[in-house]
Image (tube, coloured by chain):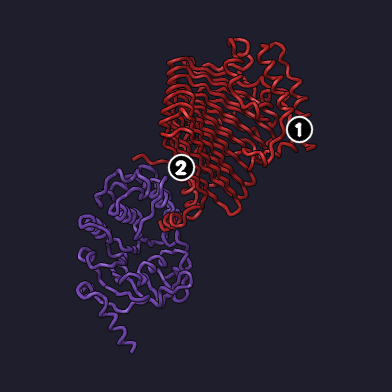
Amino acid sequence: MANDQLFKTHYTALAAGISGNSDPDAVKSLRKTAIKEFTELSFPTKKDEPWKYSKVDGLLSSLFSPAEKMSAVSDSLLTSVQFGNLETDLYVFVDGKLNPALTQKSPESSVSVITLKEAFASVPNFAETFLSKSSDKSDLFANLGSAFLQDGAFISIPDRKIQTRPVHLLFISTGNLVQPKLIISAGKSSESTFIEHFISDGNPAGFTNVSTALFLAENAVVHHTKITDESDNGFHIGRIEAFQQTNSTWKSHVITMGGGMVRNEVTARLSGEGVNCLMNGLYLVTGTHHVENITLIDHQKPNGTSQESYKGILSDKSTGVFDGKIIVQKDAQKTYANQSNRNLLLSDEATADSKPQLEIYADDVKCFHGATVGQLDEMQLFYLQSRGIGEPMAKAMLTHAFAVDVLNSIPQAEIREYLDQQILERLHSPFHFEETEV
Amino acid sequence: MLSIKNLHASIGGNEILKGISLEVKAGEVHAIMGPNGSGKSTLSKVLAGREEYEVTAGSVEYLGKNLLDFSPEDRAREGIFLAFQYPVEIPGVTNIMFLRTALNEIRKYHGKEPLEGPEFLKLVREKTKILDLDDSLLKRPVNEGFSGGEKKRNEIFQMAVLEPKLAILDETDSGLDIDALRAVSDGINKLKNKDNGIIMVTHYQRLLDYIVPDFVHVLLNGKIVKSGTRELALELEEKGYDWIREEQKEEVV
């Protein structure tokens, strides 16, 4: 495929220009291997199983380059993405690079956020400990990210520290090749909250290719919410992979509200006993946009539980994909796994594809899965209308009701309300969320 | 306030209502009785604007306007309220949110400002008192997990908050135990006044012991075949519907 060659040539040439001479050898060799893999792997096609419904081929005809300098960010943009009055530690990444001038951090914070470059230099055996474990070596885009490895952050919370103040990681794209890598290391019995938040400045075309790896030590609790709300003209591929030790809890929410083509790959490796994993997702797709969610929950050890609920709301001519796999390995006895994917089609021209899969190799487990694709319920709609609620309002209320339970497990009310408002705006809803306290 | 003339309606090509005529004046309570399948619920749904029913002939005038021209929401805004035979569950929408939205949509239609949280809550608390309802019901999703009695009571509670001019109660009594029936009918009686009309669609006479109708109509095979006063309901209770069927046959002959 000629485009495939152009794609490879373009990005390998750019990757060769990465200045990383001062980096540790392990990092340099990682980049080198990634470039080699990237060159050898072929561009995914519909014949490759996890890419069957993908629209990633748009990337062949739009090639992007990294930003040449760091753009300024307006105050109004920063204000527009605050979560009400919620106090957070804010870190702003412009085109993938941390801008320390925009950091807002409480002096009492236990969470440390340093750039990847700083981590290379200051954390002993960083590449061996955190980089070599993560990322699928056979994935083209993971390798593309590793070939450019330099932007992003290393985030850590010490053992036994409880940080209630959320860490807001705001990624602003100005329309370039943006490839940050985030490493989150949660110490034993720690608890913390992270929001990965991707937006664009204006409506530029761009390609965000981000990898996040989370390491949850024994008994750690991590609340993790990813919000993707980039430009309509943009491409976004995100890989999240969590490595969970014994008794740890990871609560993942992947909320996709904007972007022309978005692919979220979310993987949980339940590698200790008694691990809990919550994997919720909401994709709100409009226009001719496309969103795909590829999830994998890998139960490796006994007594683990996983709860997965992904919901899609698709309007206009949009398309949505859910491809979710649960593996219960031989050792993972007494596993409880529950997966559900529900899709609401708001238009006759929208499409949802759902592909739930269970692979069970243990014999004493409880696993459930279910998938639905449907429309708004006529009787519910009539019931609301019969009480004086106009049709557009009634539709918005029901659509909102469909979505809302995915958000309920986000601990901060301010974040839930922010997302609620954003969702209603996307639905062009006349309905405003305002809870009456009883 | 309501004048139905020769109303015909069908669903999927089947004619269910075959020429209904009915006059309801403000302050009146009408009971419409009839066996299963006679068209009672269809009449309720046609009046509320359920679109799956097609009106093929006749007219419905409500407060001087052609009711059939209005969308379901505009009928509600004009003061028509249908208490559903099977109230619909709406997970994810709390009762209070639902009611506040409904009330404010109706107010907006009449050019009134929306009620703010505290004002609305005051109104709601007054109404829960009248109906002896538990406040916890407000925070629960609309009808989800409600018992049969709670669902019916919730319908009457909505009616109390929205204060309709014409209430159509579709089998509000069916499936209720005697305590729930008392509570529901007490509520309806408290809401009854000289300015509003009530149409009670029911299968049983029992409800009429608690809410005394001014008129009783018998619906049979899509037509009102007999009208009378409360005594007619008692007669139906005693003798069933067969004697009316017989009367009908004789008339035809």
Where residue A148 sits in the image (x, y, percent)?
69, 22
* Relative horizontal placement of residue B187, taking residue A320 as reference (left or right): left
Quadrant housing the N terminus of chain B: bottom left
In the image, the chain rendered in purple is B
- Residue shown at the point (35%, 64%) measured from the top left: B166
Q: Position of residue A420 (x, y in %)?
A: 49, 39
Q: Which residue is mark 1?
A: A7
Does A272 appear above or below A293? above
Q: Mark 1 or mark 2, which is nearer the start of the sequence?
A: 1
Chain in red?
A
Q: Nearer the viewer, residue B149 or B213?
A: B149
Considering depth in this image, is A312 or B21 the residue closer to the camera? A312
Expressed as whole percent of the image width and height from the top left, the position of residue A260 reads 65, 40
| Residue at image location 42% in from the left, 75% down from the top | B7
Q: Please name the amino acid that badge 1 sits on.
A: Phe
Q: Residue at x 62, y 23 (%)?
A: A181
Mark 2: secondary structure: loop
**Relative to A388, is A400 above or below?**
above
As drawn, is A134 to the left or to the right of A394? right
Q: Which mark is residue A433?
A: 2
The front one of A39 and A300 is: A300
Disc 2 with disc 1 on a shared chain: yes
Percent from the top left, x then y, of residue A56?
67, 38
Looking at the image, can residue A85 be seen? Answer: no
The C terminus of chain B - image quarter: bottom left
Name the chain under label 1: A
Which sits in the foreground, A407 or A45? A45
Task: Find residue A75 and name its label.
Answer: none
Q: Chain of mark 2?
A: A
Observer-side mark, 2 or 1, equals: 1
